[in-house]
Image (cartoon, helix red, strand yellow):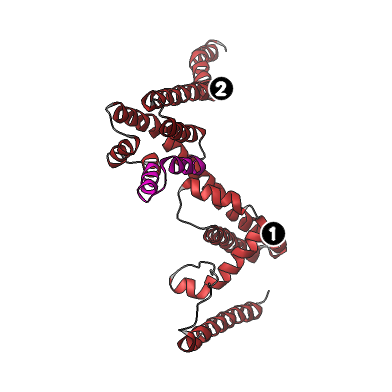
Amino acid sequence: MTPAGWGAALGAGAGLGLLLVATRILALRRPQLALRVMPYVRDLPQAVRPVLPPTPAGAFGALFGPALASAASHLERVLGGNASIRRRLERAHLPLSVQEFRVEQVLWGLIGFGVTAGVSVLVALRSPERTLPLLVLCLVAFVLGVLLRENRLSGQVADRERRILTEFPTIAELLALAVGAGEGPVAALDRVVSRSRGELSGELGVVLADIRTGTPVSAALDGLARRSGLPVVSRFAEGMAVAVERGTPLSAVLHAQATDVREAGRRALIESGARKEVLMMVPVVFLVLPVTVVFAFWPGVVGLHLVTP
């Protein structure tokens, strides 16, 4: 492309950007219909307002929020799986709705697209025949950014559940000690939650808050079992609910569950070590053994070169 063509393209891009900014400023300055009509219908019964999709705050949100919300809606229709996303957001304990998560996915995709597009422009300036493959690469980068955000969410869920499993035996033992000392289940929960910090204690704090607002103990514990994605925590909540309803010895149940979790962790550690045994041999075979062979045979090779004519 000639310099005049590049200048025309850059001028057209700058003009289009200024036009978009001016259009958005005029739209923001225009008074909304609701603000003009509200003084005259304030005394009438208010209908339920539709919940608008959340957009980023600030000037960025004011300029690009509607476009991001529309892109997030299209992405939601294409990908689907809102129930799975909502479930994972709840398990990761993230203060995000499904729509906000979709907006983040669009942003991650745009970041990947922008970085790839910047590199592609530099490559296309030297090799114009690669423009089409580079455009496809930019689209692939956008898709990878979207999928990477979802993979990051799965990683956050796994990290939080790993922390919960680490905390569970200690929390269960503390609850068993409190119950064995004569305290009731609610008082034991209050004592443990007030003296511990972590993901599981936060979940128990939610259970305690539900109980204090009038929810039955068994119903609050059933809610914990529904929210949790770990079978261990679900069995713990169900066991406590059954013990509260039927009067079974709760201390023995908690001790047994803590022991089971410790044994499961020990078995998982042994299995992980067995799976990584081959990987542990890689540095020995490809690093230590060749060096040993070189140190063993190198003096002999040098001696042969010295004695042979």
Q: Residues within 10 Å of mark 1 (few under 14, many from 20)?
A: few
Question: In this picture, which residue range is highlighted in magenta?
Answer: 204-228
Q: Position of residue 14 (x, y in %)?
A: 56, 80
Amino acid type, residue under disc 1 in the picture: Val
- In the rendered image, residue 42 lying in the magenta stretch gets the answer no
Q: Would residue 74 be found to the left or right of residue 268 on screen?
A: right
Where is 210 relative to 235, above or below?
A: below
Image quadrant containing the N terminus: bottom right
Amino acid type, residue under disc 2 in the picture: Val
Give 266 or 122, whichever is nearer the viewer. 266
Q: Would residue 139 be found to the left or right of residue 26 on screen?
A: right
Residue at 41% x, 41% y is 217
Q: Would residue 281 be found to the left or right of residue 217 on screen?
A: right
Q: Position of residue 88 (x, y in %)?
A: 53, 47
Q: Residues within 10 Å of mark 2 (few under 14, many from 20)?
A: few
Magenta-highlighted stretch: main secondary structure?
A: helix
Give 3 or 182, whichever is nearer the viewer. 182
Q: Quadrant of residue 278?
A: top right
Q: Which residue is mark 2?
A: 278
Q: Earlier in the sequence, mark 2 or mark 1?
A: 1
Residue at 36% x, 44% y is 208
Distance from the alpha carbon under mark 2 to that under mark 1: 39 Å
Q: Which mark is residue 233?
A: none
Q: Is residue 45 visible?
A: yes
Image quadrant containing the C terminus: top right
Give 2 or 124, whichever is nearer the viewer. 124
